[in-house]
Amino acid sequence: MKAIVIDGCCSAESLHVSEIPRPEARSGWVLIKVFAAGLNHSEALLRTMEADADYIATPIVPGIECVGEVADAGGGKLSIGDKVIALMGGMGRSFNGSYAEYALVPAQNVFKVETTLDWVSLAALPETYFTAYGSLTEGLQLTAGDRLLVRGATSTVGQAAIQLGKALGAKVIATCRKESSFGKLRDIGADECVVDDGRISRQPLRIRPNKLLELIGPRTLRDSLLTVARPGYVCNTGVLGNVFAVAQFDPIKYIPNGVFLTGFFSNFPTQAAIDAIMRLANQNAIHPLYAKVFSLNEIVEAHTLLEQSGAGGKIILKIR
């Protein structure tokens, strides 16, 4: 089968299509005929920073998510031909991932879906919308009437969080670095838009949020904690600011009284969560958002854009 394989850290220009053996089906794993795969920032980090680490099983096919049909159910509950999405659980890091014509994935990370979405649209959903949904429902306990601020709203997860937040009945405030992005954010559901100057807590916000999804990460986390009303919730899900930890973190002094700091780690998807996302999308006519589509042969262009964060939204790799 055709696949993208990396042996260690490398440039986008060094990526190319290889021919490797198709995976052999085995018990407890599902062989998926891959139609499309969403690209993720973590895959750019894998290629540029992590692939030489001993915890990465190189040579490796990258890719932490995909959509396709079951080619072999491995003796499990799924049937050949079922439409499925697969994500996480070590894909593209501990075992070969989704930049390939076939992917062999543990059964617990493969989920049957009922949808009329085309393959490219469906490929925009798994990791991005699961991360957004989990952050809102588990991390922020979002309910109708809440005032949600999405920090890093032009990111793929940020855009999904706006759509899902509105569907869950929240008032949504979106922040980004450029006012030129406001129109797009309003089009997908934002009620208010704010330019993020790094100090939102000092701005006279017309609507003060009681729930805040932090996608920039530790770089702006303290300011986010100071932004929410009391009681307030901040869920730190992203690290778009490329700062990965809070130095000398003292929770007593760092977290304001009356504010709850949570996080969301998307490594544990469930069928129940995927079903809930699909219901929410269907009931509210949510169409998964994506910006660019590339073929497997265009992997250099796709990963160059991914590394530069230049797409303005989700990048999809169309395999078939």
Image: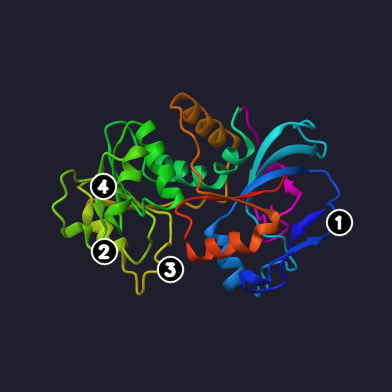
- Residue with the mark numbered 3: 242
Q: What's the distance in space between the residues labelled 2 and 4, CA to CA? A: 15 Å
Instruction: Tell me whether circle 4 and circle 3 mark residues in contact (CB < 8 Å).
Output: no
Indicate the amino acid at tag 2: Gly
Q: What's the distance in space between the residues labelled 2 and 3, CA to CA? A: 14 Å
Numbered disc 4: secondary structure: strand
- Residue with the mark numbered 1: 21
Bounds of the magenta segment: 88-114
Disc number lying in front (2 or 4): 4
Residue 66, image x and y in percent?
65, 46
Numbered disc 2: secondary structure: loop
Q: In this view, does 55 lie above or below 213?
A: below
Q: Residue at x 33, y 31 (%)?
A: 169
Please name whichever residue, 310 or 127, is drawn nearer the observer in this view of the structure: 310
Q: What's the distance in space between the residues labelled 2 and 1, CA to CA? A: 49 Å
Quadrant position of the C terminus in the picture: top right
Give the image quarter of residue 46.
bottom right
> If you read the primary sequence from the N terminus, does the residue marked by circle 1 or circle 4 appear first?
1
Q: Which residue is drawn at 79% across and 62% down?
A: 18
Callout 1: 10 Å neighbours few (<14), some, many (20+)? Answer: few
- Residue with the mark numbered 4: 193
Q: Residue at x 20, y 47 (%)?
A: 230
